[in-house]
Image (cartoon, rainbow, N blue to C red):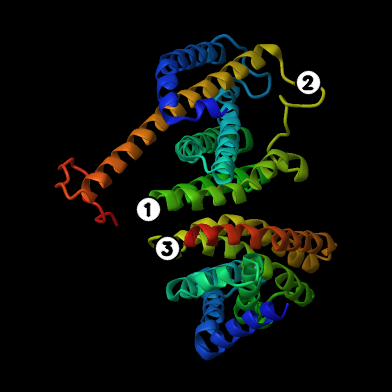
Amino acid sequence: MHRFANPTRFMRLSAALLPWTAGTAVALIAAGLYLALLGSPADYQQGESVRIMYVHVPSAWMAMFCYTVMAAASAVGLIWKHPLADLAAKATAPVGACFTLLALVTGSLWGKPMWGAWWVWDARLTSVLVLFFLYLGYIALINAFDDPTRGLKAAAILALVGFVNVPIIKFSVDWWNTLHQPASVFKADGPAIDPSMLAPLLLMGAGFTVYFLWVLMLRLRTEIVAAKVRALRLRQVRSGAPAQPSGAAPLGAEG
Amino acid sequence: MARFLSLLGRDLHLAQRHGFDSLLAVVFFIIAVVLFPFGVGPEPNILARIAAGVIWVAALLASMLSLERLFQTDYEDGSLELLLLAPLPLELVVLAKVAAHWLTTGLPLIVAAPLLAVLLNMNGAGFAVLVAALLIGTPTLSLIGAVGAGLVLGSRRGGVLLSLLVLPLFIPVLVFGVAAVDGAIAGFAFRSPLLILGGMLLAALALCPWASGAALRQALG
């Protein structure tokens, strides 16, 4: 793990991997979408609206997976003081927030024909909404400090505190027996879903995961470059040379 | 223990010297609850139906409002740095400050709650359980809030940020706090929501001083 944690090595490795992850993500999502929209049967009860599932369920998986990645990276950053881990957590947050929003919106669209309401205060829905707020709080906290490293450290603690919500989301359908259906894929006795529907679901899940890896590398590269630019500019200011006009606000002028 | 008590005494003393400041949270609590009959109309049945939830939400907001000052003044005048160097572990410093915060803001809320329950026409069966649930639940809020208050030290717009950080984490306390009171009113067993509230308090008591201490260390780092 530590071998890949050197920023220079990461830049080299990620540059080589970017096109491959991008291609794989596109191929998986394309295949998944084809099976989901054309190559799979309509549900005997839900009709065509079951197809929302192929975006909704992987988004929800990713919402929780991204938070877990964020919390794990935060822990690594706090324990081993690893700068890349902190940046990885920071880069994950907006992606996870978007997946959470996607899960909430697609769920709402699916809920209207199935339950007759855009939103119900069911335990699963509520805990995912809280997850969305936790992502927003994390992003807000990172950006609330003039010193970027302060924001990263504070947000890392928040990410770990908020992790308590992830198991609550997972088990909410079992603890509170409300509208949202319980797990049907990751079960002790195997998935309770027909292979014709499981295939597109897993393809989309894999596609979303590879897409996340691709975007994470892209964002992490941007973060590293931005940190380098910041360090260079600070050095420039300290050496007394006039700062280059770069369209960015001068130091100390933000907020 | 003596050091812990002296710090607790110091904070209580400070609150007492500031007189009205710590009571502002209670005033906010009362006003916020009183707004509801104007908002939803004075229909006694409707008010009775929403009484438990309204009182709990107002208590949540009131305890959150006063949290911003929990470490802020000590952070600004340098006392926090000295407390970090003091022979008392930082986790116990947090615990002492949280205890002082709860005694000066949480406890008055609990005293005011039955009065507000009368104003909202709450069913008499819910009164004792409301006070019990607030007694168990509000210390949990102060403990969770201490984590948020530590995290926003030195940030821009700490107060608004604090609400975004701690309100989502307050939700479980709200859910079970209201469940206990509504259960007592409807004649169900209210023991299990109270026990879950107690479990949350114990978990918060174990984990929050530690997380809050970590937040303070990085704020002063």
The residue identified by callout 3 is B154
User: The residue under label 1 is which amino acid type?
Assistant: Asp
For label 3, the SS is loop
Q: Quick one: A235 or B124, which is closer to the camera? A: A235
Residue beneath label 1, please? Answer: A147
Q: Is residue A46 visible?
A: yes
Mark 2 burial class by Cα count in 10 Å: few <14, some 14-19, many 20+: few
Q: Which mark is residue B131?
A: none
Label of residue A190 in the image: 2
Q: How far apart are the alpha carbons under marks 1 and 3?
A: 10 Å
- The chain under label 1 reads A
Label 1: few (<14), some (14–19) or many (≥20) C-alpha neighbours in 10 Å: few
Residue ID at (52%, 13%):
A28
Viewer-nearest residue: B34 or B13: B13
- Closer to the camera in the image, A209 or A232: A232
Tag 2 subunit: A
**For residue A163, above or below residue A218:** below
Amino acid type at circle 3 is: Gly
Q: Secondary structure at mark 2?
A: loop
Please check whether the numbered discs 2 and 1 fall on a single chain.
yes
Q: Residue at x 55, y 38 (%)?
A: A73
Q: Residue at x 66, y 11 (%)?
A: A196
Residue B164 in the image: state x and y as whole percent: 49, 57
What whole-number distance in Å separates the C-alpha atoms at marks 3 and 2?
50 Å
Q: Nearer the viewer, residue A205 or A81?
A: A81
Frontmost of labels 2 and 1 is 1
Relative placement, left or right, of B24 versus A19 is right
Of badges 3 and 2, nearer the viewer stands 3
